Image (cartoon, helix red, strand yellow):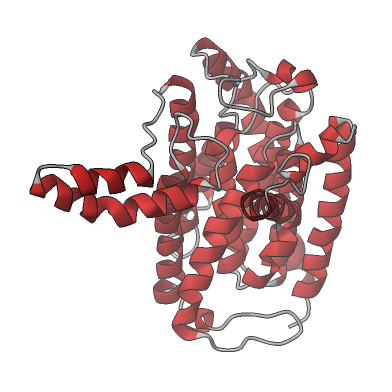
């Protein structure tokens, strides 16, 4: 058994090394492509690019493609099986395509029309056509949903709006939930809880899975604002997932997580300040979804807030800021997500990133420790 376990670790390390080398080799091609087609950070709608941060204008985005493409290729060639890896890869790709479309539209798209609810109500009242009145009444619930979710975004921008992102992310979560509930077997209808066993939850696992996939994808996305922050934190997270997968005997997931770690090593090398490129939504949404599904698939769903600790801190800081601004009319943080709050307090970017890495790493270790208690 010891020899077999050592063999698994050796194979996992091989995936890390191979994936890292592969990503390093084609990173210059990606950088050249992003610069050539001017897929770079703009300041028209990004209010965080002020003061010292203005130097980030012109930095290529969509650098997360380095990780997404490398993971897909390595998995397709060396670790592809229908039982374990094809759904996580599919969900990651769906989320990455959504993020990539948002990245490109924010650069090259046209500003989206932003119709207010009061305008629609007025049209219902004054429009002469009965058909149009009925149409506006029909679309009113959708518009209310759209406006309600808009508070989660800082501006309408030119990209995919919040309500549209949530729908696609819900689709990714639904695919994951279907796979967990229908394909993986009845043992996944029970939810592992640290120190408390695995109580049966039945179909309740479906909304739980959807919730964690959507929230985690957005949490990683909100954290993508400082050079090196997301890349370094995700290395720690997927290393933790690799170790937990190994302890649970989930070999395919062990190798998949190792592949992500290797690709992230190369990405983070180029993303350390001053960044050669930044992750963009294509990487943060894709890898956030993959983080969630990999934890769910080894039945460690309740460890996601620990494995993704710093990302959850970031997204919770946004919710707190929205609550205070919308309901109390004042800010709680100087700026959200919380890494910008510390920037405004005078912390250097490097200081924030390294301290966040350390805090995040501690909670990943805590997650591994809790996972060992059956």
Task: Identify whether 40 is placed above or below 357.
Answer: above
Quadrant (top left/top right/bottom left/bottom right) for the C terminus? bottom right
User: Which residue is situated farthest in the top direction here?
Assistant: 36
> Which of the two residues, 94 or 326, is positioned nearer the viewer here?
326
| Coordinates of residue 46 in the picture (x, y in percent) | 61, 27
Question: In the shown orientation, is residue 44 left or right of residue 10?
Answer: left
Q: How many marks?
A: 0
Question: In the shown orientation, is residue 269 left or right of residue 283?
Answer: right
Evaluate whether residue 344 shows in this view: yes
> Which of the two residues, 170 or 287, is positioned nearer the viewer here?
170
Residue at 44% from the left image edge and 28% from the top image edge: 158
| Coordinates of residue 215 in the picture (x, y in percent) | 57, 57
Task: Identify whether 367 is placed above or below 222.
Answer: below
Quadrant (top left/top right/bottom left/bottom right) for the N terminus? bottom right
Residue at 74% from the left image edge and 63% from the top image edge: 306
| Coordinates of residue 311 in the picture (x, y in percent) | 70, 51
């Amino acid at each position: 058994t010891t020899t077999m376990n050592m063999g698994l670790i050796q194979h996992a390390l091989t995936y890390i090394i191979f994936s890292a080398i592969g990503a390093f080799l084609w990173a210059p091609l990606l950088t050249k492509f992003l610069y050539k087609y001017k897929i770079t950070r703009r300041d028209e709608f990004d209010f965080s690019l002020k003061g010292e941060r203005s130097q980030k204008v012109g930095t290529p985005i969509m650098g997360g493609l380095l990780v997404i493409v490398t993971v897909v290729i390595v998995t397709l060639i060396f670790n592809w099986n229908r039982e374990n890896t094809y759904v996580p890869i599919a969900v990651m790709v769906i989320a990455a395509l959504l993020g990539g479309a948002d990245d490109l539209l924010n650069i090259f798209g046209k500003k989206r029309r932003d119709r207010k609810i009061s305008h629609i109500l007025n049209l219902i009242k004054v429009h002469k056509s009965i058909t149009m009145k009925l149409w506006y009444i029909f679309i009113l619930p959708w518009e209310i949903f759209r406006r309600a979710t808009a508070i989660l975004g800082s501006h309408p921008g030119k990209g995919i709006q919040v309500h549209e992102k949530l729908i696609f992310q819900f689709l990714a979560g639904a695919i994951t939930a279907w796979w967990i509930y229908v394909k993986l077997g009845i043992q996944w209808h029970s939810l592992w809880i640290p120190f408390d066993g695995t109580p049966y939850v039945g179909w309740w696992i479906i909304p739980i899975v959807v919730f964690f996939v959507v929230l985690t994808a957005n949490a990683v996305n909100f954290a993508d604002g400082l050079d090196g922050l997301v890349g370094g934190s995700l290395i720690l997270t997927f290393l933790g997932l690799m170790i937990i997968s190994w302890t649970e005997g989930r070999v395919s997931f062990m190798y998949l997580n190792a592949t992500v770690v290797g690709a992230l090593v190369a990405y983070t090398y180029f993303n350390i300040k001053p960044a050669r490129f930044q992750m963009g939504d294509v990487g943060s949404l894709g890898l956030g979804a993959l983080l969630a599904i990999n934890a769910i698939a080894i039945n460690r769903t309740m460890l996601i807030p620990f494995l993704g600790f710093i990302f959850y801190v970031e997204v919770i800081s946004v919710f707190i800021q929205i609550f205070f601004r919308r309901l109390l009319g004042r800010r709680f943080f100087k700026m959200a997500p919380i890494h910008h709050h510390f920037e405004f307090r005078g912390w250097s970017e490097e200081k924030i990133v390294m301290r966040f890495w350390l805090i995040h790493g501690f909670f990943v270790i805590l997650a591994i420790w809790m996972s060992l208690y059956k």
